[in-house]
Amino acid sequence: MRALRIPLLAAANLVGLAAFSWPFVAPALVSMGGRGDVLLVTIALFLCLGALLFVELGRGALGAKQVALLGVLGAAMVALRLPGFIAGFSAMFIVVLVAGNAFGPAFGFLLGATGTFASGLFVGGLGPWLPFQMVAVGWVGLGAGLLPGRGRRGRLAALALYGAVSGFLFGVVMNLWFWPFAAGSSALGWAADAGFTGNLKRYAAFYLATSFGWDAARAAGNVVLVLVLGHPLLASLDRAARRMQLDVTAPILEADEEPAGWPRPRSDGRGVEESPDSRGQDAGERPRRGDPWKVPQKADRLRLGGGKGETVG
């Protein structure tokens, strides 16, 4: 199933690309005057997303904790969308930007698409635009996961810049779903005889006249939220990413050795005693020394090829 991950992710993105670009590459469909593509896009998109989620679960890339985190972050998107939009800005984009940057492009795309669907159900945003929104917000999360940058400051700067650019690009993409029908026969609308270049110019004029100001508010809001909340959110999600993606290995022991921290018989013969380090520690960031099947602690790792009982300093 691991081999299906990339093709399914590519298929979901190709469905979205075809859904937005067909007024330019297949103008005959526009002249039909229908919106039958909405149903096709919805079915294809949900099939791709469902199969991708199934493959991610099957290959172990998304365990129970990751799925729970996907649900929690999706719920956060719903909560942040409930107050509505300020011009074109919604606070839910900060979740997609930061989570995509912390967990990678595939997780960012899944979160953007599923969180947008869930928020549409809760805020009454159901309509022919919803599958297009799912793809567009998913692309925002995917792009955030592909950002370069080292160090917290570098990542924040790149994420803030990307938040501004994606704020405009989201509007550019979303307007395509209704532009061929909304603008009619005006100078800003789609024209059957204008060709690819002519229609591209018409759409650029339509975007500048109708959507640029709204998207500027979204871009500015994204930058402000990233600069204000990006540092603590990235720290929290990076910590969660480390906990859920640890390569857990058991220490190699000699036949007559026992792992450090295992319960041992008490000297007075009453039960067992626990390691003094087996309590009160964070099980994710500082795994308990009393559980040898979690990540071995520094003092518990044995030097391979060294003397018996020799530890790494």
Image (spheres, rainbow, N blue to C red):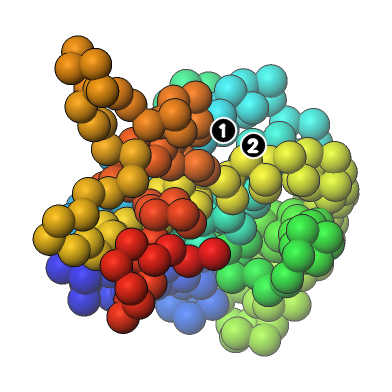
Tell me whether the residue at label 1 lies in contact with that at label 2, contact meaning CB atoms closer than 8 angstroms. Answer: yes
Q: Residue at x 79, y 31 (%)?
A: 86
Residue 95, by quadrant, is top right
In this rendered view, identify the residue nearer to me: 117 or 212. Answer: 117
Which residue is labeled 2 in the image? 92
Q: Which mark is residue 85?
A: none
Quadrant the N terminus occupies: bottom left
- Does residue 205 lie above or below 209 as drawn? below
Left or right: 236 in relation to 22: right
Left or right: 121 in relation to 210: left
What residue type is disc 1 on?
Met
- Does residue 136 lie above or below 28 as drawn? above
Q: Residue at x 64, y 51 (%)?
A: 97
x, y percent for residue 165: 77, 63
Q: Is residue 68 visible?
A: no
x, y percent for residue 118: 43, 32
Quadrant the C terminus occupies: bottom right
- Does residue 220 lie above or below 75 as drawn? below
Q: Is residue 147 visible?
A: yes
Q: Residue at x 46, y 33 (%)?
A: 277
In this rendered view, identify the residue nearer to me: 143 or 187. Answer: 143
Q: Which mark is residue 77?
A: 1
Residue 263, by quadrant, is top left
Q: Residue at x 51, y 72 (%)?
A: 21
Q: Earlier in the sequence, mark 1 or mark 2?
A: 1
Residue neighbourhood size for the residue with mark 1, other residues' Cα within 10 Å, grouped as few (<14), some (14–19), many (≥20) = many
Residue neighbourhood size for the residue with mark 2, other residues' Cα within 10 Å, grouped as few (<14), some (14–19), many (≥20) = many
Task: Provide the secondary structure element on which disc 2 rests.
Answer: helix
